[in-house]
Image (cartoon, grey):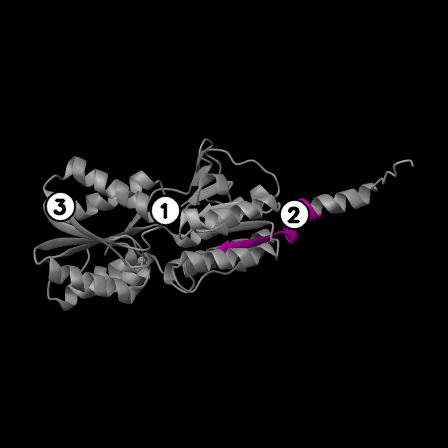
Amino acid sequence: MPRLRTRLSPLALAAGLLAGCQRPAAGGLQVALVPKLMGIPYFNAAAQGARQAARQLQLRLIYTGPTAADAGQQVQVLSGLLARHPAVIAVSADDPDAVAPVLERARELGIHVLTWDSDARPQARQWFVSQVDAETLGRHVMDVLAREMHGQGQYAIITGALTAANLNIWMHWMKVEQREKYPRMRLVAVEPGNDDQQLCFSQAQQLLQAWPHLRGIIGNSSAAPPAAARAVEQAGKRGQVVVAGLSTPNLMRRYIVDGAAPDITLWDPRRLGALVMQVARQVALGRPIANGMQLGGIGPLRVNLSTHTIVMGPPLDFTRANIGQYHF
């Protein structure tokens, strides 16, 4: 019996390709932005920047994420997005290993995958949109703390989730900088704060009690520095224990103005959210990304083609002199 052959019309073939690859015109692109945790000021600011850029680029933005800094919750959110089949999923990974399988499934379905803020396994995504160079940031934060501690004494770190890839690489470079340049300083503890201000506050209180000679605390996620500054104030140790690290100007404004913290380091998360939307559009439309380019007025970008990493720019210090210029 002769074998029947079915010929698809060019129109049907084009429709099938679009369904598999999800590459319509820019106005039809749907982009899912997933933070580590919904509702905290840092990710709220990133979402604000993403929404503004999405409107300008005529993208349809889905902003959704877990209600706690929990890798299992984040995997559930990502799994739910697969059925909606957005053109791009961009996730700040709570745990680089935990999210990798669902991101790999997304890519098998023809969904473009980006990470931002915190990376996943490199094979699970196409590009990592990083806010800063990890080594530059980690060394800089340690330099700020060491300056205020005069290069000596005990210090502790309150981080976010212990599995967060970005926080861990920043801490790595903080420790390297301390060992290389400040041998008279000693790290006595690293405690998880899970991006929860109350937990960070409790951790800071316990550190101050457990280490009476503690002279510095680094907050390695946005919730930790204001919580640590509050604990230092309540313990009557302002001027004795230095608080440094990474947070937003709104969270740290009072503590910087009244001198509880000398300054705080970060970047503008609104620009990071906007850059993720720009990169999502480039990737979904098959357009190149090159070192030194600008996207939507952000750049020049540092692009590493071997690691598929895009670095937005240098870190920014908020001080008493400039914090009034920033509101996020």
Give the Cα distance between marks 3 and 1: 23 Å
* Circles 3 and 1: CB atoms closer than 8 Å: no
Quickly name the residue at label 3: 186
Amino acid tagged 3: Arg
Quickly name the residue at label 1: 165
Instruction: Check the image and report above or below for 26 versus 311.
Output: below
Kindly tell me whether residue 145 is visible in this rendering: yes
Residue farthest toward the front in the current orientation of the protein: 1
How packed mark 3 is, by other alpha carbons closer than 10 Å (few <14, some 14-19, many 20 or more), is some
Question: Which of the pair 21/31 is nearer the observer?
Answer: 21
* Circles 3 and 2: CB atoms closer than 8 Å: no
Indicate whether residue 6 is drawn in magenta.
no
Left of 181 or right of it: where is 287? right
Quickly name the residue at label 2: 22
Quarter placement of the N terminus: top right
Image x and y of residue 125, in percent = 50, 42
Q: Earlier in the sequence, mark 2 or mark 1?
A: 2
Q: Secondary structure at mark 3?
A: strand
| Chain part drawn in magenta | 19-34
Kindly tell me whether residue 258 is visible in this rendering: no
Image x and y of residue 10, in percent = 81, 41
How packed mark 1 is, by other alpha carbons closer than 10 Å (few <14, some 14-19, many 20 or more), is many
Amino acid tagged 2: Gln
Question: Which of the pair 323/68 is nearer the observer?
Answer: 68
How packed mark 2 is, by other alpha carbons closer than 10 Å (few <14, some 14-19, many 20 or more), is many
Image x and y of residue 39, in percent = 41, 65
Q: Secondary structure at mark 2?
A: loop
Residue at 91% from the left image edge and 35% from the top image edge: 2
Indicate whether residue 33 is drawn in magenta.
yes
